[in-house]
Image (tube, rainbow, N blue to C red):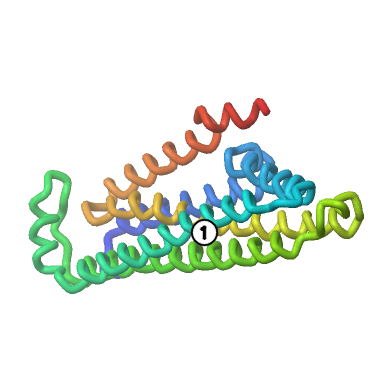
Amino acid sequence: MAQFSNLDVLALGWFLAAWLGYALLIELTSHGKRGLNGLMHRYRSEWMQRMLARDARMMDGQVISALQNGTAFFASTSLIALGGAVTLFHSNQDMLTIVAALPFGQAVTHIQWEIKVVGLMIIFVYAFFKFAWAYRLYNYVAIMVGAAPPASERDEPEAKAYAQAAARVITDAGRHFNRGQRAFFFALGYLGWFLGPVPLMVTTAAVLVVMWRRQFASDSRRAISII
């Protein structure tokens, strides 16, 4: 990081701390479990329990298929975004001129630009792996729904344990999907660094506010929490 100023290092540290801190808050704390993601995990468990009571499970298969399609869309989008980042890496001279001419832009060296672009590429690679794994987990859930005990055995201890296992797998799929989507949000915040360290801190804070509001103060969260 010798190529960057102390303010750049501070801004990057704020970005990483915000991402990690928010993820830990959402996934590991009791407050985070009261957010929209945590409430939806509860519905996933209820879904698998009620799935056992249905003899015809075509609806369950359709819902899983819809989840897979959405995950596949984001996985392919992350690859497209990665390709765009690679293009930025190879056309740095043109982009350096454009960024320096922006109202809040600042002149940067080729090495600084390339390091920033590599960081953006790493975010999109991380997002792709999260979405790809979530897609695979939804495949496993589809198989588990197909192999689930019949409705006549839904009250058996083995059937209830089976539903709980399926719920854990689909919850894990949802968790990885959320992590991939979180990477997309923070990638938008990371773009501020191309204008300078202060814009990076501002855009990171803006992303945090938007994500916090959707988790804890959105209409969707209020609607789900009263059920």
Q: Residue at x 58, y 39 (%)?
A: 36
Q: Is residue 96 above or below residue 24?
A: below
User: Toward which corner of the image does residue 82 lie, by quadrant?
Assistant: bottom left
Q: Amino acid at mark 1?
A: Gln
Which residue is farthest right?
156
User: Toward which corner of the image does residue 32 lie, by quadrant?
Assistant: top right
Q: Does residue 58 appear to the left or right of 197 in the view shown?
A: right
Q: Residues within 10 Å of mark 1 (few under 14, many from 20)?
A: many
Q: Residue at x 42, y 63 (%)?
A: 75
x then y, percent, for residue 133: 54, 67
Q: Residue at x 89, y 49 (%)?
A: 155
Q: Does residue 135 appear to the left or right of 60 in the view shown?
A: left
User: Disc 1 designates what residue?
Assistant: 68
Closer-to-camera residue (68/84): 68
Q: Residue at x 70, y 46 (%)?
A: 47
x then y, percent, for residue 227: 67, 28
Which quarter of the rendering shows the N terminus?
bottom left
Mark 1: secondary structure: helix
Closer-to-camera residue (122/96): 122
Closer-to-camera residue (147/112): 147
